[in-house]
């Protein structure tokens, strides 16, 4: 169903529900109950200009391209009596597998999908237990709580097995995550059990991509407010996945990982030290073994001052495969949600490389007031990322094997017109990339990206 057919009644429903929610909504006459409906949502509409080298690697024509790309959603949180609520979310889906399918205005319209449908029950058998049945697109393992998980964010990523047999560059996608999640929150301890048998549907149940995970966080406010440690045990199943030397077979990968975010160490308010590690094992195809690893370590410091300046340094190693011809897979496999740099890492704008990578990231930002608006209504941020391949990549031609993914410089300016609407302008430059040079017709080792957009939340 196209947006023209569905958005009009959806918007009418939003206005009606928003007005009715002020007084509550009466259920059917025989039930005599009052519902509380919370309406939220938002939109992103961006003009994105990509250099021809970036477009070519993403799978488009070898020319510069400028396009308007967008997504929008309307979500209803319907609170019933006796601690039960229903989540209903209608959304246009910006990412659908690859560059050519990114949602664009003026390209035949975008489908509006029922993206979330779930029932959440609180105090199930115990006041500390909450259960959500249905879609669980927001479930992640995010040590820092900044929306940038290095390993487990199925609703923010594409297939878990995209890295098998090589790089995942150009795989731009969201998953619709279905199953059940149980949370147990008791004082400083937070447990979750996620049973997600249908992350990617493949027809028969045996063809589904699935994940089963147990997560644990423990608050360490005695170290510093907001500090915590965490751990995850995950089992991922993939259908008919195999490297070049093996036949198709279901794969099962076990991942054990953990990390910490420690704030205010040594009495230094504004300082955060963080780190994560992951190790993988299991079966890939009929005879291969998984052996991926990941490690990150970094520090973030919020400086004192009216302009709220901050700086961050992070070091990341994601393992690669040193022998693509054998049946073993040593590349780090993940449902990641890292978008720190627009060309190398972004799932929305760039290549979305998330394996076989070693990176040093230096980022920072500052806020200021402009246009007579609220204090610090403009934010300027930027960063320099130095990216190499953990294991050499063979790009052929005169280059052959190389580890030079490239260096990227980004800068972004955000203006908050109001608390609900912001305007963004961003530029990104990739240079010194032999991987890019070996995969483009004009053998250029650099490319660029420009974005300006408007974003709204309500």
Image (cartoon, rainbow, N blue to C red):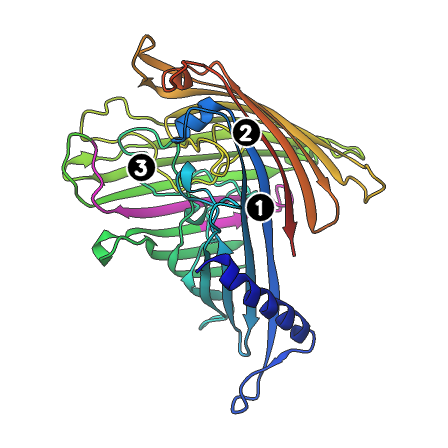
Of residues 111 and 424, the one drawn nearer to the viewer in this rendering: 111
Q: Is residue 208 magenta?
A: no
**Residue found at x 62% / y 31%:** 426
Left or right position of 132 against 146: left
Res. 274 visible in picture: yes
Q: Which residues are magenta?
A: 216-243
| Residue 12 drawn above or below residue 247 | below
Q: Residues within 10 Å of mark 1 (few under 14, many from 20)?
A: some
Query: SS for tag 3?
Result: strand
**Where in the figure is residue 213, as x and y percent of width and height?**
36, 51
Name the image quarter holding the N terminus.
Answer: bottom left
| Residue 270 drawn above or below residue 313 | below
Left or right position of 272 against 113: right
Choose the circle earlier in sequence order: 2 or 3: 3
Q: Residues within 10 Å of mark 3 (few under 14, many from 20)?
A: many
Residue ID for mark 3: 280
Of residues 47 and 408, the one drawn nearer to the viewer in this rendering: 47
**Where in the figure is residue 284, as x and y percent of width and height?**
21, 38
Q: Which mark is residue 298?
A: 2
Of residues 208 and 149, the one drawn nearer to the viewer in this rendering: 208
Residue ID for mark 1: 220
Choose the circle earlier in sequence order: 2 or 1: 1
Left or right position of 47 against 207: right
Q: Which mark is residue 399?
A: none
């Amino acid at each position: 169903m196209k947006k023209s057919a569905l958005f009009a009644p959806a918007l009418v429903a939003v206005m009606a529900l928003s007005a009715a929610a002020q007084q509550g909504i009466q259920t059917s006459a025989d039930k005599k109950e009052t519902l509380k409906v919370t309406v939220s949502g938002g939109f992103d509409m961006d003009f994105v200009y990509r250099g021809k080298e970036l477009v070519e690697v993403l799978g488009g024509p070898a020319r510069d391209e400028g396009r308007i790309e967008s997504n929008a959603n309307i979500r209803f949180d319907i609170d019933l009596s006796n601690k039960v609520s229903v989540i209903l979310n209608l959304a246009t889906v910006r990412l659908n597998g690859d560059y050519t399918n990114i949602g664009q205005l003026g390209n035949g319209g975008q489908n509006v999908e029922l993206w979330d449908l779930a029932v959440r029950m609180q105090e199930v058998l115990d006041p500390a237990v909450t259960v959500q049945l249905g879609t669980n697109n927001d479930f992640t393992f995010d040590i820092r709580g900044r929306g940038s998980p290095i390993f487990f964010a199925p609703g923010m990523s594409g297939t878990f097995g995209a890295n098998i047999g090589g790089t995942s560059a150009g795989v731009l996608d969201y998953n619709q995550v279905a199953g059940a999640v149980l949370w147990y929150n008791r004082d400083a301890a937070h447990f979750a059990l996620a049973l997600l048998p249908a992350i990617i549907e493949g027809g028969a149940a045996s063809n589904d991509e699935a994940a089963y995970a147990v997560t644990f966080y423990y608050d360490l406010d005695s170290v510093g407010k907001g500090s915590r440690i965490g751990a995850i045990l995950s089992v991922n199943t993939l259908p008919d996945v195999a490297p070049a030397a093996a036949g198709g077979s279901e794969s099962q990968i076990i991942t054990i990982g953990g990390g910490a975010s420690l704030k205010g160490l040594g009495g230094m308010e504004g300082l955060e030290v963080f780190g994560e590690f992951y190790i993988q094992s299991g079966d890939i195809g009929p005879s291969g073994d998984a052996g991926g690893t990941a490690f990150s370590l970094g520090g973030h410091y919020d400086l004192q001052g009216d302009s709220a300046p901050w700086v961050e340094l992070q070091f990341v190693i994601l393992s690669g495969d040193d022998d693509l011809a054998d049946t073993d897979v040593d590349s780090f496999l993940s449902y990641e949600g890292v978008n720190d740099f627009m060309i190398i890492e972004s799932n929305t704008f760039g290549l979305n490389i998330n394996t076989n990578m070693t990176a040093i990231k230096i980022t920072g930002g500052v806020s200021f007031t402009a246009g007579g608006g609220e204090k610090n209504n403009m934010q300027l941020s930027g960063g320099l990322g130095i990216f190499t391949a953990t294991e050499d990549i063979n790009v052929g031609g005169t280059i052959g094997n190389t580890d030079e993914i490239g260096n990227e410089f980004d800068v972004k300016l955000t203006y908050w017109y109001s608390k609900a609407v912001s305007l963004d302008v961003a530029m990104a430059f990739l240079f010194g990339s032999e991987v890019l040079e070996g995969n483009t017709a004009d053998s250029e080792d650099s490319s660029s990206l420009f974005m300006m957009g408007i974003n709204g939340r309500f």
